Image (tube, rainbow, N blue to C red):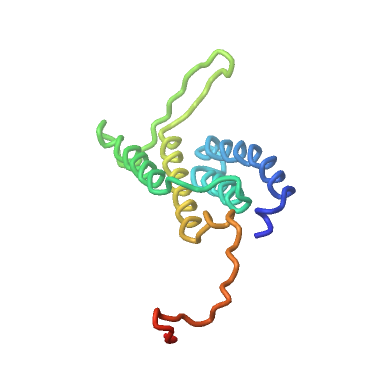
């Protein structure tokens, strides 16, 4: 594939990856108050992983672990309000005063969004694995010139 051989493509993806990751983190943290959230952050992180995989900079791994951890976080966050007598998926807001940042508000939507992000990234990694993306960085094997197979006796099959 041309992307794995192109130093310009590799350099461009390396340069753009930190900016895309910062954008994904912003979407994750701003998501419960503004447009964004776990799904859009997961798509941005997944795009970074896909581009880095296509250019041969990394091999995607641990899809099942990410999906499992994400589902555990989502279920725990969804069921936690039931323990204190509230409804399923009821959001609790936590507000605190920090020295440099001032008043900071967050809620139970943030861990829920982190779980959704983990599931989305895990699914993208599983998709890349299923499509054989790990083999993209390897050089292509030359095609065999033999069109028919033979047995030990020399007869064609």
Figure quadrant of residue 65:
top left
Q: Is residue 135 left or right of residue 85?
A: right
Image coords of residue 5 (percent x, y): 69, 53
Viewer-side residue, 81 vs 138: 138
Residue at the limit of the structure toward the right, as seen here: 8
Q: Is residue 14 left or right of residue 69?
A: right
Determine the residue positioned at 52% across, 54% down. Answer: 134
Report the quarter where the N terminus lies: bottom right
Image coords of residue 63 (percent x, y): 42, 48
Viewer-side residue, 15 vs 10: 10
Q: How many marks?
A: 0
Report the quarter where the C terminus lies: bottom left
Residue at the limit of the structure toward the top, as seen here: 99
Residue at the limit of the structure toward the front, as seen here: 153
Image coords of residue 126 (percent x, y): 45, 54
Figure quadrant of residue 3:
bottom right
Figure quadrant of residue 23:
top right
Image coords of residue 100 (percent x, y): 59, 15
Q: Is residue 143 left or right of residue 8?
A: left
Viewer-side residue, 140 vs 84: 140
Q: Is residue 46 left or right of residue 55?
A: left
């Amino acid at each position: 594939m041309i992307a794995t051989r192109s130093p310009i493509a590799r350099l461009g993806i390396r340069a753009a990856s930190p900016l895309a990751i910062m954008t994904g983190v912003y979407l994750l943290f701003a998501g419960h108050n503004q447009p964004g959230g776990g799904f859009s952050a997961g798509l941005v992180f997944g795009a970074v992983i896909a581009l880095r995989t296509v250019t041969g900079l990394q091999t995607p791994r641990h899809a099942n672990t990410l999906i499992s951890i994400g589902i555990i976080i989502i279920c725990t966050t969804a069921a936690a309000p039931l323990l204190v007598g509230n409804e399923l998926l009821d959001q609790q807001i936590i507000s605190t005063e920090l020295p440099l940042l001032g008043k900071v508000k967050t809620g139970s939507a943030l861990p829920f969004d982190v779980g959704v992000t983990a599931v989305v990234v895990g699914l993208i990694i599983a998709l890349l694995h299923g499509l054989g993306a790990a083999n993209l960085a390897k050089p292509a094997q030359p095609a065999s010139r033999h069109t028919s197979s033979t047995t030990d006796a020399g007869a064609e099959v």
